Image (tube, rainbow, N blue to C red):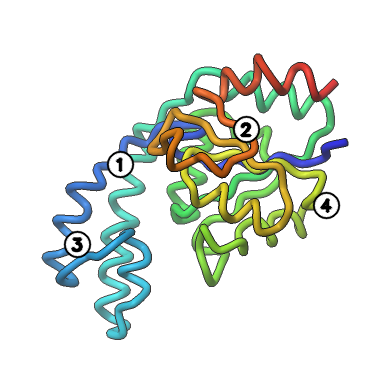
Amino acid sequence: MYEAFLFDMDGTLIRMKLDFKKMRADLEKIIGNVEGHILESISKIEDKELRKKALEYIGRQEKEAAEKSEIIDGGIESLKYLKERTMKIGIITRNNRESTLLSAKKTKILDYIDVIISRDDVEKVKPDSMHIEIALEKLNADPKKSIVVGDHYFEIEAGKKLGCLTVGVLSGSGTKETLKNADLIFDSIKEFYEEWIKWKIK
C-alpha cells in the first residue's frame, strides 16, 4: 500500500541542538526585528546583501550544530527496516544542504536516503508543499501512497496539502496541540517504528 517515506530531520531523526533563541537575538542585530519564524523573516528582506548576510549567519549556525548531531533512538532501526523492504526514503528539511549532508554523514543515515530536499532546493520552504512535491517527483512516488513524518506542524500541513499520510513525533519542537492535525502522533521515531511501521510494512 505504501511506497515512500519522507522524514523531517532535526527533531525527527536526529538532534542538531540549534539555539534558536540565540540565533534570533543575533539576527535582530543584523536585520532588526525578527517576527514569526526566522526563515520567513529573512525572506521578506528586500536588501539582497542584507538577506545574504543573514542567510550566511544561519548557515554557520547550522553547520556548527550539524557537527554535533546525534541520532534519535530508533532512527537507524526505522530507516534500515524500511530500506530492507524497498521503501523509497527521502529527507525534507528547512536546513541548508551543506549542514544536512554533514548531519546525515555524522549520524550514519546517509546510506539509507534516496533523496534529500533542503531549503537550497526549493523556492518556498515548508509549510509550503514544494519540498514534498519535489521529493516525490524524484522518487517517482504517489502522494497517496506516501508518508510524511515530522516534529513540527510544517511537515503536517505540507503533507496534508498533497494527500499524504502524516505522522507527528513529539521528540522535537512539536506538541500534541501543534501536531493535532496529523493522522497519527507518536512520542518518537522509535515508538512509530515499534508500534506502527513493523506492523504495517511487511
Judged from the image, the secondary structure of the residue bearing numbered disc 3 is helix
- Residue 8, located in which quarter of the rendered image? top right
Q: Which residue is mark 2?
A: 184
What crowding class fits label 3: few (fewer than 14 Cα within 10 Å), some (14-19), or many (20 or more)?
Answer: many
Q: Which mark is residue 18?
A: 1
Residue 201 picture location, percent across and down: 81, 24
Amino acid type at circle 4 is: Asp
Judged from the image, the secondary structure of the residue bearing numbered disc 1 is loop
| Disc 3 to disc 2, C-alpha distance | 35 Å
**Point 66% across, 33% down: residue:** 111
Judged from the image, the secondary structure of the residue bearing numbered disc 4 is loop
Q: Which residue is mark 4?
A: 142
Q: Marks 1 and 3: CB-CB under 8 Å?
A: no
| Disc 4 to disc 3, C-alpha distance | 39 Å
Which of the two residues, 68 or 89, is positioned nearer the viewer here?
Answer: 89
**Point 80% across, 35% down: residue:** 87
Of tags 4 and 3, the one toward the viewer is 4
| Disc 1 to disc 3, C-alpha distance | 14 Å
Amino acid type at circle 2 is: Leu
Which is more N-terminal, label 4 or label 1?
1
- In-image side of 35 versus 197 (left or right): left
